[in-house]
Image (cartoon, grey):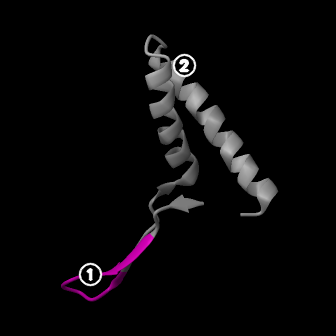
C-alpha cells in the first residue's frame, strides 16, 4: 500500500501522470524512527532503523486485523 499516492496532468503534454508515492510501511517506519531517536539518543542508527521497521510491521499487521 502506498502513502500519498497522487495523479496529475502533465502541464505541457496533458498526459495523466500517476505517482505511487512511498510505501506505507516506510512512512510508518520513518515516523517511528523520529520517536525512537528522541527517546534513545545514544542508540546506534542501525538498531534504530531495525526497531523502527519492527514498529512499522506491527502497525501494518494491526491494519490487516482491523480491515482498514
Q: Position of residue 22 (x, y in %)?
A: 47, 55
Q: Residue 15 lies in what quarter of the image?
A: bottom left
Q: At 81% from the left edge and 54% from the top edge, which residue is drawn?
A: 65
Residue located farthest toward the bottom when viewing the structure as drawn: 14
Residue located farthest toward the front when viewing the structure as drawn: 39
Residue located farthest toward the left when viewing the structure as drawn: 12
SS assignment at label 1? loop
Q: Residue 42 lies in what quarter of the image?
A: top left
Q: Earlier in the sequence, mark 1 or mark 2?
A: 1
| Picture quarter with the C terminus | bottom right
Q: At 70% from the left edge and 40% from the top edge, which residue is drawn?
A: 58
Mark 1 and mark 2: Cα distance apart in space: 41 Å
**Count of picture labels:** 2
Q: Between 48 and 23, which is closer to the camera in this rendering?
A: 48
Q: Is residue 26 above or below residue 10?
A: above
Checking the image for residue 24, the label placed there is: none
Contact check, label 1 and label 2, Cβ < 8 Å: no
Q: Which contiguous range is marked in magenta?
A: 6-16
Residue on which the image places disc 2: 47
Residue on which the image places disc 1: 10
Q: Is residue 50 above or below residue 58?
A: above
Residue 24 belongs to magenta span: no
Horizontal relation, residue 4 to residue 13: left or right: right
Label 1 crowding class (10 Å Cα cut-off): few <14, some 14-19, many 20+?
A: few
Horizontal relation, residue 51 to residue 5: left or right: right
SS assignment at label 2? helix
Q: Between 9 and 36, which is closer to the camera in this rendering?
A: 36
Amino acid at each position: 500500500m502506498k502513502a500519498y499516492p497522487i495523479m496529475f496532468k502533465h502541464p505541457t503534454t496533458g498526459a495523466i501522470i500517476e505517482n505511487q508515492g512511498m510505501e506505507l510501511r516506510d512512512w510508518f517506519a520513518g515516523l517511528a524512527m523520529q520517536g525512537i531517536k528522541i527517546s534513545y539518543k545514544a542508540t546506534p542508527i542501525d538498531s534504530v532503523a531495525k526497531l523502527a521497521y519492527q514498529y512499522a510491521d506491527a502497525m501494518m499487521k494491526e491494519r490487516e486485523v482491523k480491515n482498514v
